[in-house]
């Protein structure tokens, strides 16, 4: 029993040497040491795997955020391009519509001028016939009176053709 207590005391460093005490030293056999090393290795590997997974997950999240940002930016650029094109088309349509309206207006004015020119020519011809066919002095006098009544002026200057000058003066 004293030898087993000595072995136990030596194993845990409990033997005395003089007045100094040594701290207990635990000893382990090689299988326990190997087990503990495997546990430490397993723990370190588990922590490294967890850390790698965290880094990978964070990288995937950042990648996803960046992809979303890029997609959003490109969508905005496409939308702005579409709006710009739509405005251009609207502007071109407004210009074309305005040009068509102006063209119609000019055609209408030209047609009106043509009609007025034709009427003027017809009236000149009819007037010449009427002056030759009827009593021209009476006819010209009636035309001048009718024009004066329309103007309602106190002083009026009368212009006439050279061939009618004598009739107007009379």
Image (cartoon, rainbow, N blue to C red):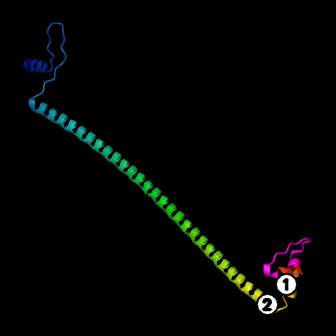
| C-alpha span from label 1 to label 2 | 11 Å
Position of residue 71 relative to residue 111, above or below, is above
Position of residue 1 relative to residue 44, above or below, is above
Side (left or right) of 134 relative to 86: right
Q: Quadrant of residue 130?
A: bottom right
Q: Which residues are magenta?
A: 146-164
Taking the spot 12% from the left edge, 33% from the top edge, the residue there is 34
The residue identified by callout 2 is 132
Dot 1 crowding, Cα within 10 Å, few <14, some 14–19, many 20+: some
Q: Is residue 133 visible?
A: yes
Q: Nearer the viewer, residue 14 or 49?
A: 49
The residue identified by callout 1 is 140
Q: Position of residue 49 (x, y in %)?
A: 24, 41
Taking the spot 68% from the left edge, 80% from the top edge, the residue there is 117
Element marked by disc 2: helix
Q: Is residue 161 visible?
A: no
Side (left or right) of 158 relative to 55: right
Image quadrant containing the C terminus: bottom right
Dot 2 crowding, Cα within 10 Å, few <14, some 14–19, many 20+: few
Q: Nearer the viewer, residue 3 or 63?
A: 63
> Sequence-wise, which precedes: disc 1 or disc 2?
2
Q: Position of residue 69 (x, y in %)?
A: 40, 49
Q: Position of residue 146 (x, y in %)?
A: 87, 81
Taking the spot 79% from the left edge, 78% from the top edge, the residue there is 162
Q: Does the segment drawn in magenta span residue 7?
A: no
Most distant residue in the bottom direction? 133
Element marked by disc 1: helix
Taking the spot 54% from the left edge, 63% from the top edge, the residue there is 91
């Amino acid at each position: 029993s004293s030898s087993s207590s000595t072995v136990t005391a030596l194993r845990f460093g409990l033997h005395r040497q003089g007045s100094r005490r040594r701290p207990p030293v635990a000893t382990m056999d090689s299988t326990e040491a190997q087990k503990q090393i495997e546990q430490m290795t397993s723990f370190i590997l588990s922590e490294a795997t967890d850390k790698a997974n965290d880094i990978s997950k964070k990288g995937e999240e950042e990648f996803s955020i960046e992809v979303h940002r890029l997609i959003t930016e490109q969508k905005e650029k496409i939308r702005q391009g579409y709006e710009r094109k739509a405005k251009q088309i609207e502007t071109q349509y407004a210009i074309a519509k305005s040009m068509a309206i102006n063209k119609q207006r000019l055609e209408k004015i030209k047609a009106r001028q043509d009609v007025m020119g034709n009427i003027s020519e017809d009236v000149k011809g009819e007037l010449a016939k009427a002056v030759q066919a009827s009593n021209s002095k009476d006819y010209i006098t009636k035309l001048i009176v009718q024009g004066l009544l329309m103007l309602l002026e106190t002083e009026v200057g009368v212009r006439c053709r050279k061939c009618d000058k004598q009739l107007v003066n009379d």
